[in-house]
Amino acid sequence: MSLKFNTLIILLEIILVTSCKKKDAFFVLTGTVNDVTFNTSLNNAQVDLYQVNAGSAEVKLVETALIGSDGKYSFRIKRDKIEKFILKIHKLNYFEIEKTIYFAELSVEKDNVYNFETKAKGWLRLNLNNLNPQPTDVLEYVRQQGKYGCTECCPNGVQLVYGANNSSTICVNDGNTVYEIFYKMQGQSVGTMVSINTVAFDTTDLTINY
């Protein structure tokens, strides 16, 4: 058997081995999720891994895992022609985490580590009571401190309440943190600041009588 033929056989074997390695390559997605509210690992949270294939708009659920007491999660997924993965982490009464991971940022040579943090939810029940209503009354109030920009959050900016009023509004907040509101009657130069700590996993009442 000639040297050239032997060399060709070796090259073909290398190509076949390399091809098999690529074909059988896996991505490992792993990390830790921390509970910032209680400064501990977030256990018993559900992690859903979704996949979007290249050239497709379909979001497909690939696998679901439950986070253990150490706060860690891990997925081992076969390398395929995908555009991106989407990680969603959720637990009752905690803010959901969502992370998009694109194919280009993933490695088959090492673990792909994504660590996250979340907080427990607390709720503010804002009670507004006009004790001596007049048709021309306009109450202005605005959040000075508290969570904003989320689906369950109360609106940003100055809120106006007209005339007779006896109402309640629920606002989500980070648990065990302060929610603060500044309010005044429209036309007045002086207002009042009120605040309260919103207890994690519970609804805390803040009443403004005006």
Image: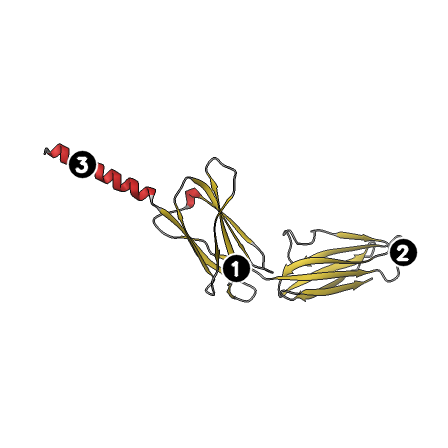
Amino acid type assigned to the residue bearing label 2 in the image: Gln
Residue appearing at x 64%, y 57% in the figure = 147
- Give the crowd class for mark 2: few <14, some 14-19, many >=20 residues within 10 Å: few
- As shown in the figure, which amino acid type bears the numbered disc 1? Ala
Question: Is residue 191 found left or right of 116 in the rendered image?
Answer: right
Which circle's residue, 3 or 2, is located before the other in the chain?
3
Of the pair 49 and 206, the residue shown nearer to us: 49
Q: CA distance from mark 3 to mark 2?
A: 95 Å
Q: Nearer the viewer, residue 66 or 73?
A: 66
Mark 2, secondary structure of its residue: loop
For the residues labelled 1 and 3, the Cα–Cα distance comes to 52 Å
Q: CA distance from mark 2 to mark 1?
A: 50 Å
Q: Which label belongs to residue 127?
A: none
The residue singled out by tag 3 in the image is: 9
Chain-order first, disc 2 or disc 1 = 1
| Disc 2 target residue | 134
Q: Residue at x 34, y 46 (%)?
A: 25
The answer to which of 152 and 88 lies nearer the viewer is 88
| Towards the viewer: 136 or 119 | 119
Q: Is 178 left, or right, of 17 in this rendering?
A: right
Q: Residues within 10 Å of mark 1 (few under 14, many from 20)?
A: many
Which numbered disc covers residue 45?
A: 1
